[in-house]
Image: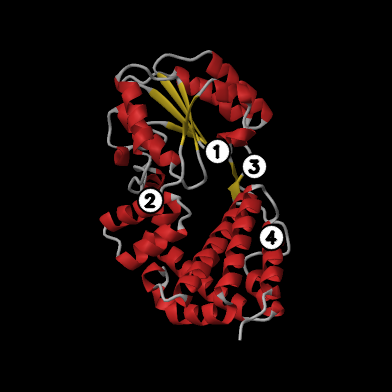
Amino acid sequence: MARKKVQEKEQNTKKPNQIFPLIGHSKQIEFLKQAHAQGKMAHAYLITGPEHVGKERVALEFIAALLQKDAARLIAGIDFTVIERAADEKKKRHGFSISVDQIKELRNTLTRQSLVAPYTVVLIREAETMNRNAANALLKTLEEPIPHTCLILLASHEEQMLATIRSRCQTIRLSKVAVEDMEKALAAQGVAEKESRAAAQMSRGLPGIALNLAHEKEAREWQTEEVDRFFKIISGNLHDKFQAISSFVGSKRSADHTSARETVHNVLTVWEVLARDAVFAHYGLSEQVVYRDQEKRLKEIGERVGAQRLGKLIEEIETAHEGLDQNMNGRLLLEHLLLQINTYETTS
């Protein structure tokens, strides 16, 4: 019995965040640190940008400066409070929104001043998921700021937030990171040239995706599967094409729309990189090819499909990306794309 209690205690012990190396956003981090150093801090910040661009990573650097600690040693729940969509225990996933009760508790957290830390910090993930009542409750807190506190809101879709909340926060916008900078950063971490090049190209300018592809075995295995899927789609008949996508896009609506959309984004990115590679291979530009281990197959596709039709495919994929960003149905976009691919006549 005693042993069981020790095990439970060890499992419940809070540990420092596992954080990836920082890639990009040096100007934004310097701005935040300078505001703190010069005593010109806002009481609330809204950090915005695409998913996986590094919003929370930037926030951790800022929190570390506020609390005078190393970012890698920060412990969520002890050094700062995190508010996010509440877990749905029955469905084994996060709920759809941040509730008003969570925001009301936030006020209590802010009023409990730390006896050690110079600031009480609260981080709100996916701030755009606050329901209406929660947003109104937060607005009251923003209108009556408490000294020595700092609210940091993270949002991928700031347009979904109340304008009155946005206006009361200092907005820090993060943009995608250049592929060249991403590749250099990964190489500096000791990632092999082949992996760093592929991860950077696949990342869509998003450090979170690049780091995941470069360091996580499962992500690399997934990438290999998607490369094989691309060749099946290009070479197969229409039935084979639809069969190829059925394994990751089911007929039923996904319970987690954000996750499903991200999956389709990632798949499309693999296809886009491979289509570009096929064009480069067709023209003998081997140094431009990302998937160099697939160059023979890519050259065959380039010769059979032709550079012009591959260029059209790349345009269709870019259009599908835009559709996903506008919350269009991922399955319908993929099916439309497959129908377009099927209309391309093969070259002799």
Mark 2 or mark 3: whose residue is earlier in sequence: 2
Number of other residues with Cα within 10 Å of mark 3, as a class: few under 14, some 14 to 19, many 20 or more: some
Relative height, residue 70 to residue 323 (above, below):
above
Q: Which of the two discs, 2 and 1, labels the residue nearer the N terminus?
A: 2
Q: Residues within 10 Å of mark 4 (few under 14, many from 20)?
A: some
Q: Which residue is labeled 4 in the image?
A: 333
| Distance between the alpha carbons at the discs numbered 2 and 1 | 33 Å
Residue 226 in the image, given as x and y percentages of width and height: 53, 70
Q: Secondary structure at mark 4?
A: helix
Residue kind at label 3, given as amino acid type: Phe
Q: Provide the residue designation for mark 2.
A: 7
Place of residue 15 in the rendered image (x, y in percent of width and height, measured from the top left): 35, 43
* Amino acid tagged 4: Leu
Q: Amino acid at mark 1?
A: Glu
Above-or-below relation of 43 to 252: above
Front label number (4 vs 2): 4
> Is residue 32 or residue 76 the one in the foreground?
32
Labels 4 & 1 near each other (Cβ < 8 A): no
Label number found at residue 149: none
Dot 3: element: loop
Secondary structure of the residue carrying numbered label 2: helix
Nearer to us in this view, 131 or 2 = 131
Pointers 4 and 2 in contact (C-beta within 8 Å): no
Q: Can you tell which mark lies on residue 96? A: 3
